[in-house]
Image (spheres, rainbow, N blue to C red):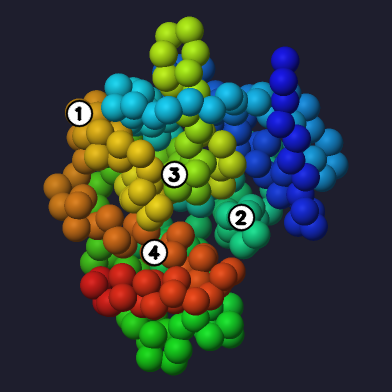
Amino acid sequence: MSAFRKDDHGLPGATGFEAAGLRWLGAAAAHGGAPVAAVVAEGPGWIETRRIDGGRPDAAAAEELGRALARTHAAGAGHLGCPPPGWEGDGFMGRAPLPLHAEPGPSSWGEFYAVDRLLPYLPAAVGNGAIDAEGARVVRRCAERLAAGDHDAPQPALVTGAAARLHGDLWGGNVLWATGPVGVTATLIDPAAHGGHAESDLAQLAVFDAPHRARIVAAYDEVSPLAPGWRERVGLHQLHMLIVHAALFGGSYGRQTVATAARYA
């Protein structure tokens, strides 16, 4: 068996958080959820996962991923911002911290998203010059409307609780496609797993545009219908990934964050 080894690169706990997330998502995969890279070994500061040989994505595999992702989300989470089982403290999204709650925190999704997924990253994005003072005011106005519940919407139909089981960092590069005995399949890697709104995972697929994204979302919607107006909320659910990038990398990510926030402010 071939394995891929990953070190924490100076972020103590990062690989442990990833391993906990892979096991949590893997538990859903065992019941028809989206496949994830299996953890084969781990230790302080490192993790090994089963190596996935590359393949060419196709529409049929994308549709199967959409159906399977709906089942992963439907496996649920205890509450908004909950960590994977066995993990204590905050997590990581790339090299950025990811606020998590062992016990239920904000009571509504909008408050959770504003307090835990937008505002924590604003000081760093302002500090590195990616977002100026006026841009920061726009982001804060958006956060105020979120916290007030103006943009709250139901979870997709299969998600019966308050929180879906999210991958949490589902850009196209974290979906690997491999050709196997039954054809092409998609496997998820590098999660920032937590409890949240299912639309966030789907919206993140569009930030760097995963292959056959429209087919993924359409198949998802067939299995677990999305709430009315979901297309108008895509940008809203992308804001977390955008502001994290603004905080970490600066540059045009700040302008993109502010322009997107302005649509919901």
Q: Is residue 123 visible?
A: no
Q: Kindly identify the amino acid type of the residue bearing the numbered disc 4.
A: Leu
Mark 1 is surrounded, within 10 Å at the Cα level, by few (under 14), some (14 to 19) or many (20 or more) other residues, namely: few
- Mark 3 or 2 closer to N-term? 2
Q: Which residue is mark 1?
A: 222
Q: Nearer the viewer, mark 2 or mark 1?
A: 2
Which residue is farthest left? 228
Task: Give the residue at x 62% y 62%.
Answer: 96
Image quadrant occupied by the C terminus = bottom left
Would you say 132 lies left or right of 124 here?
Answer: left
- What amino acid does circle 3 point to? Gly
**Residue depth check, mark 3 versus mark 4: number of the one nearer the observer:** 3
Which residue in the protein does label 4 denote? Answer: 239
> Label 3, label 2: how many angstroms apart (C-alpha)?
14 Å
Ranked by sequence position, the earlier of labels 3 and 1 is: 3
User: How far is the residue under mark 2 from the one under mark 1?
Assistant: 31 Å
Of marks 3 and 4, which one's residue comes earlier in the chain?
A: 3
Q: Earlier in the sequence, mark 2 or mark 4?
A: 2
Residue linked to disc 2: 94
Q: Are marks 3 and 2 in contact (CB under 8 Å)?
A: no
